[in-house]
Image (tube, coloured by chain):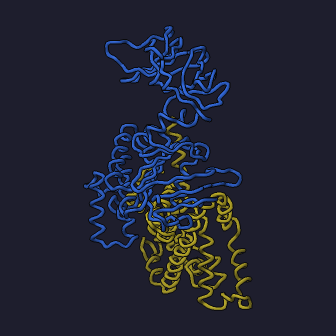
Chain colours: A yellow, B blue
Amino acid sequence: MRRFWSWSIVGLGVVYFFLPLVGMLEFSLKMRRGAYSLDAYASVLADARFRATFGYSAVMAALTIVLGVLIVVPTVFWVRLKLPKLRPVIEFITLLPLVIPPIVIVFGYIRLFNTSSWLPLTGSTLGSDILLMIGYSVLSLPYMYRAVDTGLAAIDVRTLTEAAQSLGAGWATVLARVILPNVLVAVLSGAFLTFAIVIGEYVFAALLDRPAFGPYLVWAGGNKAYEPAALAVMTFALTWACMALIQLATRFSRHTRMQPK
Amino acid sequence: MSFLDLSGLRKSYGANAVVKSFDLTVEKGEFVSLLGPSGCGKTTVLRMVAGFETPSAGTVRIDGQEVTGLKPNQRNIGMVFQAYALFPNLTVAQNVAFGLKIKGMPAGETRDRVADMLRLIGLPEMGSRYPFQLSGGQQQRVALARALAPQPRVLLLDEPLSALDAKIRVSLRAELREIQQKLGITTIFVTHDQEEALSISDRVVVMNAGLAEQVGTPFQVYNQPRTRFVASFVGTLNTVEAQVLDAGAGRLAIHGAAVQMAVPPGTRGKVQLALRPEAVHLGYGVDGDVVLPATITAVEFMGSVIRVRAACADRIMALDTFNRPDTPPPVVGAAVSLSFKPRDLILLEG
């Protein structure tokens, strides 16, 4: 009997979560009157603005991931190795983007880097793109930091570093050839989460007036009927694909089956 | 001039001096063990030699070159860690080749050297395996090969056998010594296991509270301990209190029994003497032996050796006797006589 109730509650949860998705999927397939079709998806894919905004956001996501990795991996490594007492402070800083609304951050950026400031980044396309990439890095910081931190916690950072140093490796070699390959799965997890965040982000892109996918989603939602549902399904699929890739990366990483530190 | 020269090494963290003043000279090809309890500073000394800790004072010289200010990767020192520290993302062969690649050795030479090293450690077929596919003993062998591959000037071993089970530990320490002698590499070995240190070292440095209490061959350290700490840490030890009756004539008394042994002139009052369990015998012994009455309190059968504990006056004395298949071990509670030769008594300084 207890088993029955347990499964009933699980079933209720599944229905609560999946029913709206099924409804959305069904609606996205009803563009053609009286029959299910992929017309809404075809319409979305044929839209030049979709391709342009999605391409732009994908490039921005890739750049954000690179910037995030360059900032987070050495920071976490150094904090774990040399400044363990600073860890709570760094963790607090990385959590700030979750508690400070993006609109506050972006207004701060605009105020600091407007055309009459000492660094007028908003005055040019390239400057705005850089600002957007930095903003995205800040937004994804909690996820990237935690993913990398968890990855580094699984290996004996100090001993591996010292072993590499005793073999003649400098800091750059230690990071590139010892630390990074051993936290690659964690970095990939952070990267896929970052990708999912950047692809759907609206506030930064809209207020910095950049042609990103988030503002396109909002525009489509206000101006089209079936395409927004198709876009939502596609975005969901993309996020889930990212999650699946994280699992895949974990499974195919042979050396992660190492013994714990 | 010695090959490795540690002079006046000191390491403090705030007011806490972990290593107070450490001097040691090691000859080329020598195997020296730093032996001591946890927290005595032995690993800190090793880490200062490796460059992972900066000495608060003192110098480290290798082959005449002062390396105190050099970074760890500039010292050409090989190190093996307790936790193996193999790079989990690299195969065994790639691990061994790591230091060679950093040195810029050509690919062909690297391949040959890796093969040589794997043959040296007895794992020639394991090159393509990952560390997680090896046992603890195999991993530590690979770690040794990796440390030796770039031909370091000094090999540092930081409790490399501690994480292994007893049987592997004994066989691997013999292999370690054999490889060290074959290559003639100057080696410093840190351990808290006295049996390990005594069995494979040319010299042993017994450390306590940041200081080297005694430096000597295993025979010297065991049989002629200079301080009470060395005597008690290295091997099992009975301490006996004796009353000096006449220092000049070498006359002492242990629980009323007269003893003749040399003591420094002018010694007065009570002195502490040490006695190894193997120097104490059950029964009266021969003329000239010191004989004390005792009661057996415990008997530990350890195979070839039987360790007996006996209450003698206010102390418990331990003694070792060889097992004889035709003689049963003594019985707890039996009244016995303990005998020993005065020449086996060791006068403790501190």
Residue shown at the point (55%, 15%) measured from the top left: B311
Out of B168 and B214, give the one closest to the viewer.
B214
Q: Residue furthest front?
A: B248
Residue A97 visible in the snapshot: yes
Relative to A200, does residue A208 appear above or below in the rendering? below
Residue shown at the point (67%, 27%) measured from the top left: B268
Relative to B298, does residue B42 appear above or below in the rendering? below
The picture places residue A38, in percent across and down from the top left corner, at: 42, 74
Judged left or right of residue B122, residue A219 is right
Judged left or right of residue B269, residue A24 is left
The picture places residue A228, in percent across and down from the top left corner, at: 54, 75
Residue A24 visible in the snapshot: no
Residue shown at the point (53%, 29%) measured from the top left: B346
Number of marks present in the image shown: 0
The quarter in which the C terminus of chain B is drawn is top right
Toward which corner of the image does residue A246 lie, by quadrant?
bottom left
Relative to A113, does residue A41 appear above or below in the rendering? above
The picture places residue B114, in percent across and down from the top left corner, at: 30, 62
Out of B34 and A4, give the one closest to the viewer.
B34
Out of B162 and A11, give the one closest to the viewer.
B162
